[in-house]
Image (cartoon, rainbow, N blue to C red):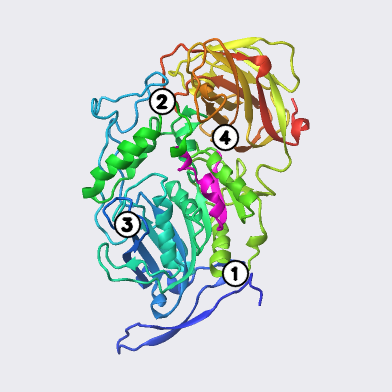
Amino acid sequence: MNTLKKHFFTLTVLAFIFLSGSQLIAQDVQIPVIENGRAQVIPELENPENWIREDLWVETEFDSDRDGKPDRVHVDVTRPKQTENGLKLPVVYETSPYYAGTAGMVDGLFWNVRHELGELGSNEVGEGKSRRAHPEVIRRGERPIISNSQIKTWVPRGYIVVHSSSPGTGLSDGAPTVGGDNESLAPKAVIEWLAGKDNGYTTRDGNEKVMASWSTGKVGMTGTSYNGTLPLAAATTGVDGLEVIIPVAPNTSYYHYYRSNGLVRSPGGYLGEDIDVLYDFIHSGRESLRERNNLRIRDTEMAENMDRRTGDYNEFWAGRDYLNDMPAMKAAMLMSHGFNDWNVMPEHSYRIYEEAKEMGLHTQIYYHQFGHGGPPPVEMMNRWFTHYLFGVDNGISDETGAWIVREYDDPANPTFYPDYPNPASEPVTLYLNSGAPQKGSLSLNKPGKQGTETLVDNFSFDGESLARAEITDHRLLYVTPPLKDSLHISGLPTINIKLASSKPAANLSVWLVSLPWNERRNGRITDNIITRGWADPQNHESLTESEPLKPGKFYELTFELQPDDQIIRPGQQIGLMIFGSDKEFTIHPDPGTELTVDLDATTLTLPVVGGKAAFSW
């Protein structure tokens, strides 16, 4: 029998359908039904009235709230009623700190960014006691069902869906740590229970145990953003039973989320957020333990180590970087991310994807051209779950490479490439030609001596305004001639810059833009900003130690911009924009800092499909 066309096992169950004479009718239900390598919707499993929904607690091996007892995490289960009669099915599992509600966006929640570099901004709220407000989460009602996500997609296809609340959130014990070990070990404990361990309980504090007797022990995890981070966290424990993860826009390093090359840099849309803000935002756990958790985690560990003054990398941040924990990982992985995600930026997925390949794990990546979120097409996810959870030989284990949604295509119709970056991509060096305060140029040939050009930092002008300005001394802009043919960029652009600052500290922001700027209503997210990057010149030698700049002294630093895969249309110009403070992302120091760039020692390297020969202007 061709397993790509049809693969199932038949279970005979007694369906307790009470007719007029209380007659019992026997039914045959085929679970799963496989066509073209994918689990199909089974009519008998579509009706929610035929699902069993229950909540329980799973005991972990840690005590993160320090109450003297192992933490238990709250779990809900949604499974077909046929599992009451001996049927065992695989599990799709999602865990989150958000299920029980979050703190509101109150005044003073975020750090004040209007201050000089190297200082801490204080807010009016809590002045003298705290530098920002600490709102309490009002937890949603103690409902037995944690979430409805994933259920309608996977239960009708023959899976069981499980959710759990992260430590210190909802009805789970513990303390939130925002990337600490307990956030990895909690889903590990749930997976161990699903694989047969007797650490499940019917209540939060009782002794009555419950087994996951309906589980085959094979688990797949998925989720978006924080919910996409936690599948990776679980996978890095090397737990048996976790066969495959599909993280969507995961935060894989809290340093990379809140810092950039030594610079204090907010995630897009959340200016002034930092790791302690996220802690307050999710801390929905038991009210009686919150004060103690806050003192130990937020007000001690985070306050003493997150270091908003310098932005340096340290052991605190290293402990919240999942790249450092990957040696134990053995689960297969389908990663998903948007190239224009300026919240959890695309480097988060790229760095894990690259490491997974190096480790020999089965992995693919799905990139789209939109912003935050965006899972792979359901049919793609289905193939991965069908193979790794139902054991169907559908060919997926032999497939590697990258799926990329092109600029004007539907997300359900990605284009396949042998890898990302595109294997045909080659580094091409572009050189700067003077032109400030208007526009200089980018060329493929190294020009004669150019000297220096200077910009004056002023955070009150946002990046779009600077890119569109004809003349301004608040940025330096260098553009190519209009392209005659399309140009395919695939990979990580790199800038090597030599600069001097008039002050001991300065923000450095770099945008790669496509000009002229498209202001039309039908403009797309890919039309204007190609990619971006930020860095702290004080970290020119090391991410772990800042060095105050000597005013007027030139320093060299090299850093990568965010990964991208974009086809620039004919007629457009590629522009390199260098400026200081980025109004949407960085600290806002007083205007006036001068940054002087040595044009002869500054270059932009673009990863171009076809290399230098692909340029046509």
Asked if one can make out residue 580 in the rendered structure from this viewpoint, the answer is: yes
Q: Amino acid at mark 2?
A: Arg
Q: Of the residues under marks 4 and 2, which one precedes in the sequence?
A: 2
Q: Residue at x 41, y 14 (%)?
A: 590
| In the image, residue 266 above or below residue 500 | below
Asked if one can make out residue 481 in the rendered structure from this viewpoint, the answer is: no
Q: Of the residues under marks 1 and 4, which one precedes in the sequence?
A: 1
User: Quick one: 232 or 247, which is closer to the camera?
Assistant: 232
Tell me if mark 3 has few (under 14), some (14-19) or many (20+) residues whose alpha carbon lies within 10 angstroms of its own: many
In which quadrant of the rendered view does residue 540 lie? top right
Circle 2 sits on which residue? Answer: 309
Q: How many marks?
A: 4
The label nearer to you, 1 versus 2, is 2
Q: Residue at x 47, y 55 (%)?
A: 234
- CA gap between label 4 and label 2 equals 24 Å
- Which quadrant is home to the C terminus? top right
Callout 2: helix, strand or loop?
Answer: loop
Q: Position of residue 130 (x, y in %)?
A: 27, 30
Q: Position of residue 214 (x, y in %)?
A: 42, 73
